[in-house]
Amino acid sequence: MKRLTAQLKKALAALAYADAGEMLPGRDKNRVLGISAKPRPAAPAPAPVPPRPRVEAAPQPSLNGQVGLYLGATLDPAVVHYAADTCREINAALTVVTFQSEDRARELLEPHLAELGREGVVWRIARLRGEPRASLSRFLRHEPRMLFLVCSESGFLGHAVRSGVGRRMDFGLPIVMVTAEENAPTMERPRIVARS
């Protein structure tokens, strides 16, 4: 029985040592097993990185808020002109709010980018998804620096404002509808109707 007990003790010790060995780092395992560490080849020295030229960032203009421009399936030049003039006069950014795809929105804005550049207008596109009235209302409520939203009388929002549906939609800010005067002989002059 003593011989069996000694063998059991050896087996249990070997098992415990094997389990403990799993917790050892690789270098210690190699030492216990009598494996000498092979020398690793030296890693090549990294190539020197040339210093980056220091670029001074242009000072960002201090803007007084945002003017929203609702962009539907078409874009009336009078609406863009009014929005660009307003942004320049009050030193505000322009946020183009649309349900169109990014590519389609840029395509509609393309003829007016030179004017926005001349006016020094900082602009961006905010693309909305979902049910138009709810999505637009939610977006405008979460834009605290939005001063008002400009739209054309011929688009979705213009029709909603003119039909009275727009009065029941609470966007939380004024809607400025740019319309063409009927008696304008040469050039369309915007008539502004503020609604909230």
Image (cartoon, grey):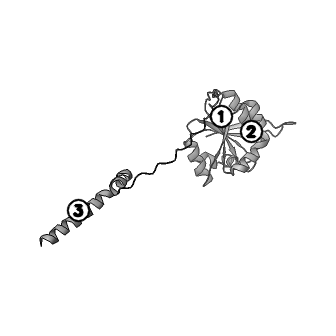
Which residue is pictured at 61% across the width and 35% down the height? 49
Q: CA distance from mark 3 to mark 1?
A: 76 Å
Q: Which mark is residue 93?
A: 1
Q: SS at mark 3?
A: helix
Q: SS at mark 2?
A: helix
Q: CA distance from mark 2 to mark 3?
A: 85 Å
Q: SS at mark 1?
A: strand
Task: Report x, y in % for residue 169.
Answer: 59, 47
Which residue is pictured at 72% across the width and 34% down the height? 84
**Placement of the N terminus among the 4 image quadrants:** bottom left
Residue 186 can be seen in this image: yes
Closer to the camera in the image, 184 or 106: 106
Task: Report x, y in % for residue 157.
Answer: 67, 47
| Disc 2: which residue | 80
Task: Report x, y in % for residue 54.
Answer: 63, 28
Q: Which mark is residue 13?
A: 3
Q: In this rendering, is residue 31 above or below 190?
A: below
- Crowding around mark 2 (Cα neighbors within 10 Å: few <14, some 14 to 19, many 20+) is many
Closer to the camera in the image, 107 or 166: 107
